[in-house]
Image: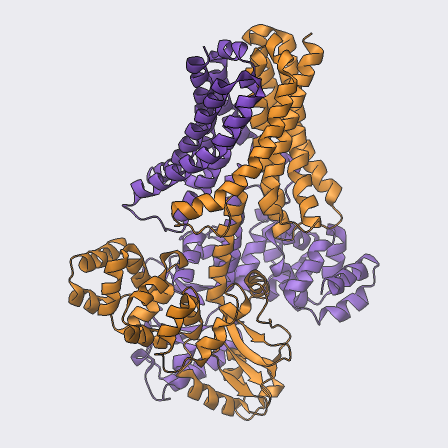
Chain colours: A orange, B purple
Amino acid sequence: MRKLLDRMVDLVRRGELALFTRRAHDFEPADLAEVLTALDEKERVSAVQALPPELSSQALAEMPEEAHAEETLAALDPDLAAEIVGELDDDDAADILGELDPKRQEQILSAVEDRSEVDQLLRYHEETAGGLMTTHMVTVTDTSTAEQALEEIRRQAEEVEDFYQVFVVDSDNHLVGTLPFKDLVISRPERPVRSFMTDADIFVTPDLDQEEVARLMARYNLPSVPVVDGLGHLLGRVTFDDVIDVVEAETTEDLLKFGGVSPDEELGAGWETAVRSRLPWLSINLLTAFLAGGVVYSFQHTIQRTLALAVWMPIIAGMGGNAGTQALVVTVRRLALGLLPEKGFTRVVGKEVLVGIINGLAIGTVVGVVAAFMGEGPRLGLVVFLAMVGNLMVAGFAGAFIPILLERSGVDPAVASSIFVTTFTDVCGFLLLLGLAGMLLL
Amino acid sequence: MRKLLDRMVDLVRRGELALFTRRAHDFEPADLAEVLTALDEKERVSAVQALPPELSSQALAEMPEEAHAEETLAALDPDLAAEIVGELDDDDAADILGELDPKRQEQILSAVEDRSEVDQLLRYHEETAGGLMTTHMVTVTDTSTAEQALEEIRRQAEEVEDFYQVFVVDSDNHLVGTLPFKDLVISRPERPVRSFMTDADIFVTPDLDQEEVARLMARYNLPSVPVVDGLGHLLGRVTFDDVIDVVEAETTEDLLKFGGVSPDEELGAGWETAVRSRLPWLSINLLTAFLAGGVVYSFQHTIQRTLALAVWMPIIAGMGGNAGTQALVVTVRRLALGLLPEKGFTRVVGKEVLVGIINGLAIGTVVGVVAAFMGEGPRLGLVVFLAMVGNLMVAGFAGAFIPILLERSGVDPAVASSIFVTTFTDVCGFLLLLGLAGMLLL
């Protein structure tokens, strides 16, 4: 497969566009999208020009957001661009055009034959149910029989690409129920759909955040979910394939937040964007680093007397940071998945503190022995041992306590926790090591 | 909703099981599962005993893995347990029973009426296509017409809970194609299915890793994918709802690996498991911490001469660690999503180095000025400035280079990168700060 795709890329690069187009018919849209993504902008434009619009449209729709299909569209002759947009599903068209500035958007849309649906979708924020939904769906009225419904489905299905449920509406287009396909084919032809439809008690409004939409569909195992306005009118539907994309995007976002990168930084962004996204976080980190540095500053005399302490500083602080991060990822994930019992707070924090003490005893024994034999004698060993146990205990506490506290204060624990936890373990690590040394090594 | 579920929990706790059972009929399985999850083991068993098996089975199937539905099953009277297992879809039954030891598994299964399907599924590893698949599906033979296929679907649909595609097999049960529902209802009754089915060129084998299955279904937007053996016989199908669960589980796994926690540690695991999962990672970290400590050790005399260096050590090393992690999460995620161009290696690393230099100049200027005015004069300021710029440049390089190198060597970059990157930034940070101090502060 890999090789087949590479060969397609080469065909475009060598300018053999006729052969490329002939072969393209055997590929799935997602595979063609991968070929387009691998090309540079100029090559991509020539490839899209060579493909028939029904193929190029689907391939552009499947390109990852980072590959900027909208740039390619904008670089095309407006008539060809409009033709491609006309071939796109309305939700994909809105997604791609939504990335362009209003002027270029209008330039393309003005040449599109039926732009009303795309116009409607462009009004919603892209990270909401409205931004994910398509207005293409199959609906039947609640007065139909099973046979009439099947008839209706045959009529509408030509236009709707994939559908997994049929929506039932009243004469005012209010959503009243859904018909799973299965029930439709197995029911007697003369049965009214009202008698076997499922009540429409699961639906979303267009302004619902995409993450909530994904959670709802995953929870209830829905292949598609209806979108209704505040008055209950059916507007569109979101399908499972959009949801899988959302879950992937949210994973990226969570990992970036955890690493201190703004979730707005696209993965392939240039250096200017990367600096803008990361420098603010580094600046906050600098403030907390000064805190740790301040602790060291106040113990300078202790360090002067026992220089070996300078060697153990990064070891105690670093191990605390690692252990704190371990407790943190587990707690953050439990919070994200709603797996943390409301009342089990003490038990959760208590477990992490216990884990910290046990790991601290193990690691502390190793470092204590090494320190004792490194020249300063058993008293330094004891100081290092106690500081390690103490700091890993603190790390367990901070790793569990801080994200729970942030969550309850309404702050996203994924984004702010790691900075607080490592500050905590740095400061406590230095305080423990240098403070104990001040007491025990005099 | 929240409140409704809390009230159900209270009903069980107060022992009002008759009322609980009556109300349970109005809830979705996923919601009942949440109620069961919130209960403790004893309460859960009494709730399950009170519910009719067709409700309790679905609720148990929807419980998160961490809530251990199998424990509840094993605590029931074997006949009731067998009745519940009989109501479960075969894949859910295999998932739950697979968590029990063989003896208790056999005890329950021996009382199940038709155990052959579950037995078959229990043979596959739970994290493979075989472990995800159900053997319940709708199949038609390739000699049928559209009308005969619809007839067949009506017959089979009674037993199959949800289906989104119909599979076409030859007389030997070889998979030859799939019929999207839509095409089936819109085609003329006398048309042979062979003439409008989709060729079966997308399928998986039972041993394929679940992550690959998820990626395939997401890529091609498939509501279900057929599972075939090495000879092309149709064994079962995996549906989109399993895939959403897989994507969520993999997210948890990635975040845990990133934080240095074994992905085998369940989120709600006890302290013994947590220690076993985290201590090995801390031990590896300790070795790298010794490396950083060793650098400090070899510069003890420099520190003795300029004690203020001890204050700047954690600041330079810490900021390097943060900047390295930023470059790392972006690169790891690009690798995971396949967004890194094969040949763009130098450009990717180059960008991160550039970002490091720019952020280094900004942060370095601040710390340089502070250091210069802190008492040791402008030369210390220069040392701190240069060390910060250098270390953030190194951080950008390591954050991008190390995961790419690991990936190309066949090592999972998510699990091993962060330890190498922070070791790198610690060691280089100390070397730069103390080395430059040795040269410039004499």
Q: Position of residue A80 (x, y in %)?
A: 28, 74
Q: Name the quadrant of the N terminus of chain B.
A: bottom right
User: Would you say residue B77 is visible in this rendering?
Assistant: no
Q: Where is residue A105 in the image (x, y as percent from the top left)?
A: 39, 70
On screen, B133 above or below A110?
above
Marker count (numbered): 0
User: Would you say residue A82 is visible in this rendering?
Assistant: yes
In-front residue for pair A22/B45: A22
Which residue is located at x 15 percent, y 57 percent? A14
Left or right: where A343 falls relative to B398:
right
Which residue is located at x 45 percent, y 67 percent? B223
* Occupied quadrant, residue B94: bottom right
Left or right: where B55 falls relative to B314:
right
Q: Name the quadrant of the C terminus of chain B.
A: top left
On screen, B335 above or below B32?
above
Which residue is located at x 31 percent, y 43 percent? B347
In-front residue for pair B437/B51: B437
On screen, A417 above or below A360?
below
Which residue is located at x 35 percent, y 73 percent? A108
Q: Where is residue A5 in the image (x, y as percent from the top left)?
A: 25, 57
Left or right: where B180 falls relative to B20:
left
In-front residue for pair B332/A348: B332
Q: Where is residue A121 in the image (x, y as percent from the top left)?
A: 49, 73
* Occupied quadrant, residue B271: top right
Left or right: where A439 falls relative to A115:
right
